[in-house]
Image (tube, rainbow, N blue to C red):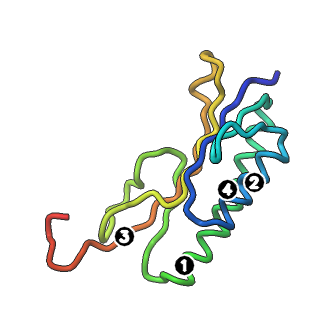
Amino acid sequence: MELSTLVIYDIEDDRSRTRVSEACKDFGLERLQFSCFRGKLSQNKREELHERLRRIQEEWEKRWKKDFPEAPAKPVDSPSPPPEEAKGTWQPAFKIMIQPICEKDMRSALYAYLFVDVPKPEGNSNA
């Protein structure tokens, strides 16, 4: 059974953002705004899309680690920061939400968030 699905994302990296957009189009979703797509997807198709977006996220994470090898990055399946304590502060760097629009299916939203540990500014212990 196909359900109306909404995909919203916030990704600063141009390459990754373009690949996420292409994935949404490949799954037959219609662009509503620059980073917002909608369409009808079965639960299996939503999960397939989620996996594809996770692979895009993993590729971004590898590039991040090359540039910032000391800064941890943690993928999570919710908008909440990872439970591990950060050396600085956890900041979301790659946010995706795949949300069914049917009320009875609202609990099955899929998230693909990646948080990065951003160092606190020196000399500011309250930040």
| Helix, strand or loop under label 4 | helix
Q: Earlier in the sequence, mark 4 or mark 3?
A: 4
Q: Amino acid at mark 4?
A: Arg
Q: Element under label 1?
A: helix
Q: Is the C-beta separation of discs 2 and 1 under 8 Å?
A: no
Residue shown at the point (42%, 55%) measured from the top left = 82
| Callout 2–callout 4 Cβ contact below 8 Å | yes
Of mark 3 and mark 2, the one earlier in the sequence is 2
Query: Residue 22 at x, y = what percent?
Result: 79, 53
Label 4: few (<14), some or many (≥20) within 10 Å? some
How far is mark 2 from mark 4, CA to CA? 5 Å
Crowding near the residue tagged with mark 2, few <14, some 14–19, many ≥20 C-alpha atoms within 10 Å: some
Q: Which mark is residue 118?
A: 3
The quadrant of the picture occupied by the N terminus is top right
In space, the residues marked 2 and 1 are separated at their CA atoms by 20 Å
Question: Which amino acid type is shown beneath numbered disc 3?
Answer: Val
Label at residue 65: 1
Relative to 47, is 11 on the left or the right? left
Q: Viewer-proximal residue, 44 or 96?
A: 96
Kind of element beneath mark 2? helix
Q: Inspect the image, locate mark 2, and give the three-letter code of the amino acid beneath it.
A: Arg
Q: Which residue is mark 4?
A: 54
Mark carried by residue 52: 2
Picture residue at 52% right of the left edge, 52% below the top: 76
Mark 4 or 3, closer to the camera: 3
- Decide if residue 70 is on the left or right side of residue 96: left
